[in-house]
Image (cartoon, rainbow, N blue to C red):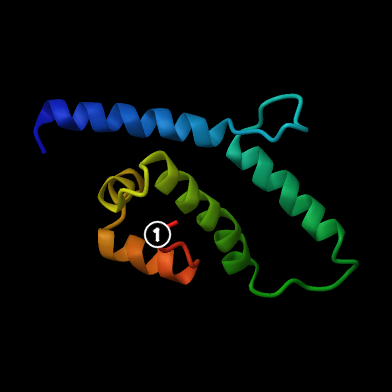
Amino acid sequence: MPINQRSKHLKGVAQLAEQVLTMTTEADVEEKTLAESVRTSLKKYFSQLEGQTPANLYNLVLAEVEKPLLELVLKLTNNNQSKAAIILGLSRGTLRKKMAAYALNHK
């Protein structure tokens, strides 16, 4: 990829990352980073376990984050899988496998 295309791509990725990291729901009064949102959600999840030991937590968290991330990036790229794969840092094949796993085929 030529240097000027790379810099445009990196600028686009930075803008997307900023959008993802500062997304809030309408109920949120202040912006939260993605890490803060995950931390808050995990604390709430653990408080609701009532002493039970969670199972498969890593995969649960990944699935909860990965699916909406894929949906958002695909929407931002108008379902252009090549562009989405570049933004996500995945191969198109890996993106397609993840889309199939989350039933995100051609929305």
4 up-or-down from 55: above or below:
above
Q: Going by the picture, which residue comes out furthest to the right? A: 50
Q: Residue 4, position in %: x, y? A: 14, 25
Residue kind at label 1, given as amino acid type:
His
At 52% from the left edge and 57% from the top edge, which residue is drawn? 67
CA neighbours of label 1 inside 10 A, class few (<14), some (14 to 19), many (20+): few
Q: Residue 105, position in %: x, y? A: 41, 63
At 66% from the left edge and 27% from the top edge, which residue is drawn? 31
Taking 66 as reference, is 23 left or right? right
At 66% from the left edge and 38% from the top edge, which residue is drawn? 36
Q: Quadrant of the N terminus?
A: top left
Q: Going by the picture, which residue comes out furthest to the left? A: 2
Choose between 34 and 77: the one closer to the eye: 77
Location of mark 1 (residue): 106
At 28% from the left edge and 31% from the top edge, which residue is drawn? 10
Taking 98 as reference, is 38 left or right? right
Q: Residue 74, position in %: x, y? A: 41, 48
